[in-house]
């Protein structure tokens, strides 16, 4: 008998048209994680990858906060999520709050969000190389998060990332399983040569 996890992994089996690194093709965003704790050594490696991300004028307009499951900080950050994301993110052993720094000494940084995306992708690909999956969530109470953690004035909470090893999908709601089994095809028309 085929298990749910086998079905989910089959749906998300990479089918690239060209050879790219496996950390990219194997990356997808599950909604269920195992209880395995991410060791601080791996957490440090993951954030080191973000530190090396490119940014306009090397401003590096990002800041990350992380909270481990079982801590007060995790519970607070978790409480800022919308109900649907709470229904599955509770299984993640690590939550990351990614903040964008929208101003610098030169004034408003119009590239800050783009640069934050580069840093987030860097840490996600590094995490994937270590066997950790992640899912980004935009639906959360940003002001509540800012208040809980007394963030710097120009640090704007932008995304929360759930991270961990993929779970076995036992005791998961039908709604979550249905979404996991929904194939998410990759766009094929994305580039055109200019003449």
Image (cartoon, grey):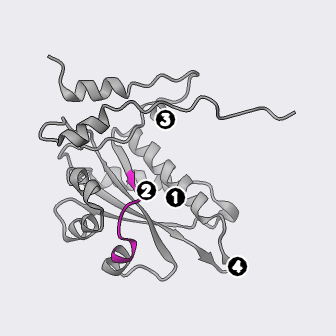
Identify the residue position indicated by label 3 in the image: 24
Magenta residues (range): 136-144
Identify the residue position indicated by label 2 in the image: 47
Disc with the residue nearer the chain's start (2 vs 4): 2
SS at mark 3?
helix
What whole-number distance in Å separates the C-alpha atoms at marks 2 and 3? Answer: 18 Å
Question: Are circles 2 and 1 on residues that touch, CB within 8 Å?
Answer: yes
Give the foreground label among 2 and 4.
4
Left of 164 or right of it: where is 157?
Answer: right
Left of 84 or right of it: where is 98?
Answer: right
Identify the residue position indicated by label 1 in the image: 51
Viewport quadrant of the C terminus: top right
User: Can residue 168 be seen?
Assistant: yes
The disc placed on residue 106 is 4
Disc with the residue nearer the chain's start (2 vs 3): 3
Q: Residue furthest left?
A: 171
Q: Residue furthest top?
A: 1
SS at mark 2?
helix
Disc with the residue nearer the chain's start (1 vs 3): 3
Residue 141 shown in magenta: yes
What whole-number distance in Å separates the C-alpha atoms at marks 3 and 4? Answer: 35 Å
């Amino acid at each position: 008998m085929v298990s749910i996890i086998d079905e989910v992994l089959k749906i998300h089996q990479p089918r690239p048209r060209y050879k790219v690194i496996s950390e990219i093709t194997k990356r997808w965003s599950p909604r269920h994680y195992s209880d395995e704790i991410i060791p601080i050594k791996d957490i440090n490696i993951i954030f080191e990858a973000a530190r090396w991300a490119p940014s306009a004028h090397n401003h590096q307009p990002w800041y990350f906060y992380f909270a481990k499951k079982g801590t007060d900080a995790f519970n607070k950050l978790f409480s800022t999520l919308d109900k649907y994301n709470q229904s599955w993110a509770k299984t993640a052993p690590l939550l990351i709050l990614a903040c964008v720094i929208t101003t610098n000494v030169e004034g408003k940084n119009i590239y800050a969000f783009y640069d934050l995306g580069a840093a987030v992708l860097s840490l996600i690909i590094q995490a994937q190389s270590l066997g950790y999956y992640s899912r980004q969530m935009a639906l959360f109470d940003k002001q509540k998060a800012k208040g809980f953690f007394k963030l710097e004035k120009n640090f704007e909470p932008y995304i929360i990332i759930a991270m961990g090893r993929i779970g076995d999908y036992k005791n998961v709601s039908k709604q979550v399983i249905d979404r996991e089994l929904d194939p998410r095809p990759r766009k094929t028309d994305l580039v055109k040569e200019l003449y």
